[in-house]
Image (cartoon, rainbow, N blue to C red):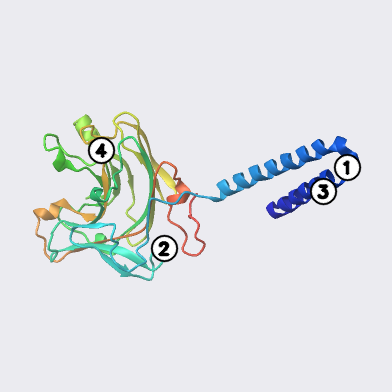
Amino acid sequence: MHYFKEKIGFSIFTYCIYLRRNCVKMKVYNLFFTQIAFIFLIFLCSCNGKLKRKEIQKPNLIEEGFESGTFPPLFKVSGNAPEIVKVSDAREGNYVMRSELNQSSEIPHRTEAAIPPDKNFYFEVGKEYWVGISIKLGEEFKDSVDWNDQGMTLQWHYKSERHPEVIGKQPLVIRYTDDGKVGVQCEVFVIQEPRKEVYMAYAEPDYGQWVDWVIHLKFDNTNGIFDVWRNGEQIVDFEGDNHQMEMIEGTYMKFGLYSSQYKRLKPGNFSRVVYHDALRIADSTGSYKLVAPKDRDTGIDNFK
C-alpha cells in the first residue's frame, strides 16, 4: 500500500510538471497544477514519516539472554560467581545464569550478579523503568529443612555505605520465604512505620518451572510506582512513597541468590540453586511487551 501511494504520487507530480512546461496555452492552470503536485508530495512525506515512526521501537537499555556462554562484561560478581550454563529448557535461547549456595560455597550467603552503578547504570530517583526477567527455583528448594530457609532472587539495592548515618533497607525484593512462598517486598515500608507489612504480594514457588516477571517501577518518596506481573497476572499495583529519601543516588539491581542466614548457620549437606534468563531493562519509553520474556518458538510474549 505504501509503495502504491508513493508510485501514484510520483506519477501525478510528473504529469503536473509536464502540463506546466508544455501546455503554454493553459497558463490559467499552471499555478493550479503546481500547487496540487506539491500538496500531494507533502501529504506523502507526512505518511512516510508516520510509517517510519511507527516501525521504530526504542531498544532496551539492557538486553541479556546469556547466549555468549560467558559471564556478561556489563555485570559484576557479588560474592561467589554465578555460572553461565547451557541447558535444554532455557527460557529463551540455550544459556542461563545459574546461582548456587551449598555447604562448600566460599562466600556462604551470596552468589549474585550486579548491574553496578560504577558503570553508570543507576535506577535514578523519580524516573520510571520497565524490567522483564525469568526466574526458576531449583527442585532442591523442595527439600525440607529445620532452619530459616529464605533467599532473595532479585533485589534493588541502595549504596548504603555512602550513608552510614541511616538504616539501609532495600526498596524492592523478590524473595523465597521460609514458609515456602515467593514474596514481593519493600523493606523501606518498615522504616516509614515499624509495624507496617513489608510484603505487597505472595505467590507459589513453582519449583523447577520458569516464572516470568515484569516490573514497572519508579522510586520516589511521594509518587513512587510498583506494578508487578507474574506470568502475565498483575499481583502488585502500588503508588506512593517507596523510597528512602536519604539515598539520593538511586538504586542498582542484583540477581542470583542471597540468603543472609548462611552467614551464621553452617548446615550439613544442602544445596539451593536459582536460574535467571531473559533479562530486559527499558526506561520510561518502555512497555510490558518490550521487556516481557518471549515464547521460545514465536518470539512473542506469552501473556499480554
Q: Does 170 appear above or below 292?
A: above
Q: Position of residue 86 (x, y in %)?
A: 34, 71
Question: Circle 2 sits on which residue?
Answer: 92
N-terminal of the two: label 3 or label 4?
3
Question: Which-is-in-front pick, marks 3 and 4?
Answer: 3
Front one among 81 and 226: 81
Cα distance between the residues tagged 3 and 1: 11 Å
Q: Secondary structure at mark 2?
A: loop
Q: Of circles 3 and 1, which is in front?
A: 1
Residue 248's place in the image compared with 64, above or below, is above
What whole-number distance in Å separates the C-alpha atoms at marks 1 and 2? 68 Å
Residue holding disc 4: 198
* Measured Cα–Cα span from mark 2 to mark 3: 58 Å
Q: Tag 3's secondary structure?
A: helix
Q: Which residue is mark 3?
A: 18
Q: Residue 210, percent across and down? A: 37, 59
- Residue 179, visible in the rendered structure: no
Give amino acid for label 4.
Answer: Val
Which residue bears the numbered disc 1?
24
Of circles 1 and 2, the one toward us is 1
Q: Quadrant of residue 96?
A: bottom left
Q: Residue type at mark 2?
A: Glu
Mark 1 to mark 4 CA distance (whole Å): 83 Å
Give the residue type that dot 3 points to. Answer: Tyr
Q: Secondary structure at mark 4?
A: loop
Gap in angstroms between the C-alphas marked 2 and 4: 32 Å
- Taking the spot 27% from the left edge, 57% from the top edge, the residue there is 75
Seen at 81% across and 40% down, the residue is 33
115 relative to 82, above or below: above
Observer-side mark, 2 or 4, equals: 2
- Image: 290 above or below 240: below
